[in-house]
């Protein structure tokens, strides 16, 4: 169920909020129970098979966390290893089985066929949250949460499918506060929802369509057209994921729950280490806390730091997708982050403007590898730097929606319209209300054109 679809905006969300508000007005504890129920209904709308699988893995992880939390001695360590391996295998079966079959076929020259395996929506995101919960249970940091608390932490519908990846310490304490209606939060939340929907429908989708068309036939496209497609996809990917994050944060705010921010002006970064501190922040935080820190040991030589960075980005590449292109994408990002970290550590004087241009170029070129096979990416890379003949042919055909998308993209980037600033500056004034009404009209007119969020595939 897309946040920008009519069935969500006109049916699900109003019912969910009105009933919650009735409970919240009476300070009733049933308000949280209602949110848990709505979140499970939201998940059920993705498919009954997915819903039952989700419920099963959530219950298994909740019981596993309680067992680990209550365990003692070597048994606790064995239990946490066993249950984490179980979660990894669960994720691996759905996401990587056919990729492993491809590897076996390639290495041993077999002809094994793929299994017909569907990919549960959001599996990569909630699996990470469950694994983090198990690790924290081993560390004694989960306080023996109730099943209701755990269900709400994992299944809260605004962040269930594409994040932000939340930590139990961020969500569960908020759930334990007395439910109440906060007009300022509701106002800011609605504005963020509309802003995210505008980003999705008017910026992300048109630029994605353009890029897909350009990448579909790289051999016949001009270098200029491919550069336009590459930059469009780079920008559209940011707006697609950040629009979901904006709507998720806004939806949660309606219920007085504050989700962590996921972006901090990534296109202002001046090296790749800086970029990854700004991009998909909650994913970077998880990888840092549970992968990097598991590999890196303070006091060791600096090469251990760079090794830990490479392992972390290798895991990131594998997490993003089942394919050699994702592995290579992770490795190359790791190398560039190591270079950026070295420059920062040694305090090497680098012109920030040149660094910014190089960083944007690296991000854009790596995005090609992110969405194409290695062989197709090589074709595109070769064509990108082929300036003859007619390097700018085909660019004029991109259309009005793409032009509007690029204009709005520059507007959002220049005026720093990200969730933190919007929430800080948003006040219930007449002007802001009129802007919100105008955005609501645009969203209503654009509902039939909304595409699936790109990160749904993960």
Image (cartoon, rainbow, N blue to C red):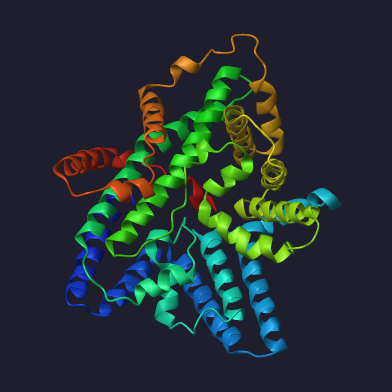
Give the image location of residue 248, x and y in percent. Answer: 38, 55
Q: In this view, does 119 lie above or below 393?
A: below
Instruction: Report whether 84 appears left or right of 199.
Output: right
Q: Give the farthest residue toward the right.
A: 108
Q: In this view, does 35 lie above or below 413?
A: below
Count the marks: 0
Give the image location of residue 24, x and y in percent. Answer: 21, 73
Q: Give the farthest residue toward the top.
A: 389
* Picture quarter with the N terminus: bottom left
Give the image location of residue 128, x and y in percent. Answer: 56, 64
Which residue is painted at 59% across and 9% down in the image? 390
Which residue is painted at 39% across and 44% down in the image? 418
Q: In which quarter of the image is residue 391?
A: top right
- 86 vs 175, nearest the viewer: 175
Instruction: Report whether 342 appears left or right of 368.
Output: right
**One can see residue 111 in this view:** no
- 321 vs 293, nearest the viewer: 293
**One can see residue 248 in this view:** yes
Which residue is painted at 45% across and 58% down in the image? 161
Which residue is painted at 73% across and 56% down in the image? 308
């Amino acid at each position: 169920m897309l946040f920008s679809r009519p069935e969500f905006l006109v049916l699900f969300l109003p019912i969910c909020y009105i009933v919650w508000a009735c409970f919240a007005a009476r300070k009733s504890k049933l308000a949280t129970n209602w949110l848990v129920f709505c979140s499970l209904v939201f998940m059920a709308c993705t498919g009954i098979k997915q819903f039952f699988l989700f419920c099963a893995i959530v219950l298994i992880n909740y019981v596993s966390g309680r067992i680990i939390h209550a365990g003692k001695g070597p048994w606790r360590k064995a239990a946490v290893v066993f249950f984490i391996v179980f979660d990894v295998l669960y994720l691996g079966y759905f996401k990587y089985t056919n990729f492993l079959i491809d590897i076996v076929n390639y290495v041993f020259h077999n002809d094994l066929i793929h299994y017909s395996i569907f990919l549960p929506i959001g599996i990569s995101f909630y699996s990470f949250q469950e694994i983090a919960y198990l690790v924290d249970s081993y560390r004694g940091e989960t306080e023996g949460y109730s099943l209701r608390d755990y269900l709400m932490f994992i299944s809260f519908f605004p962040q269930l499918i594409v994040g932000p990846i939340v930590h139990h310490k961020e969500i569960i304490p908020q759930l334990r506060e007395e439910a109440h209606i906060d007009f300022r939060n509701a106002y800011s939340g609605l504005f963020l929802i509309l802003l995210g929907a505008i980003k999705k429908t008017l910026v992300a989708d048109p630029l994605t369509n353009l890029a897909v068309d350009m990448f579909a036939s790289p051999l016949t496209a001009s270098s200029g057209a491919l550069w336009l497609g590459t930059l469009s996809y780079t920008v559209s990917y940011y707006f697609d994921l950040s629009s979901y994050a904006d709507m998720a944060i806004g939806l949660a705010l309606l219920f007085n729950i504050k989700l962590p921010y996921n972006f901090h002006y990534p296109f202002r970064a001046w090296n790749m280490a800086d970029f990854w501190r700004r991009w998909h922040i909650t994913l970077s935080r998880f990888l840092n806390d549970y992968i990097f820190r598991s590999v890196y040991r303070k006091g060791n030589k600096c090469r251990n730091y760079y090794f830990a960075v490479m392992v972390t980005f290798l895991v990131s590449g594998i997490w993003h997708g089942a394919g050699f292109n994702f592995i290579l994408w992770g490795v190359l990002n790791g190398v560039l982050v190591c270079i950026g970290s070295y420059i920062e550590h040694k305090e090497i004087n680098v012109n920030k403007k040149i660094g910014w241009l190089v960083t944007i170029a690296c991000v854009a070129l790596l995005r090609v590898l992110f969405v194409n096979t290695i062989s197709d990416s090589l074709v595109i890379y070769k064509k990108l730097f082929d300036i003859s003949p007619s390097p700018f042919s085909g660019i004029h055909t991109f259309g009005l929606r793409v032009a509007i998308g690029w204009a709005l993209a520059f507007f959002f980037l220049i005026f720093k319209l990200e969730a933190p600033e919007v929430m800080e500056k948003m006040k219930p004034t007449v002007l802001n209300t009129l802007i919100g009404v105008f955005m609501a009209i645009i969203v209503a007119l654009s509902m039939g054109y909304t595409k699936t969020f790109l990160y749904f595939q993960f």
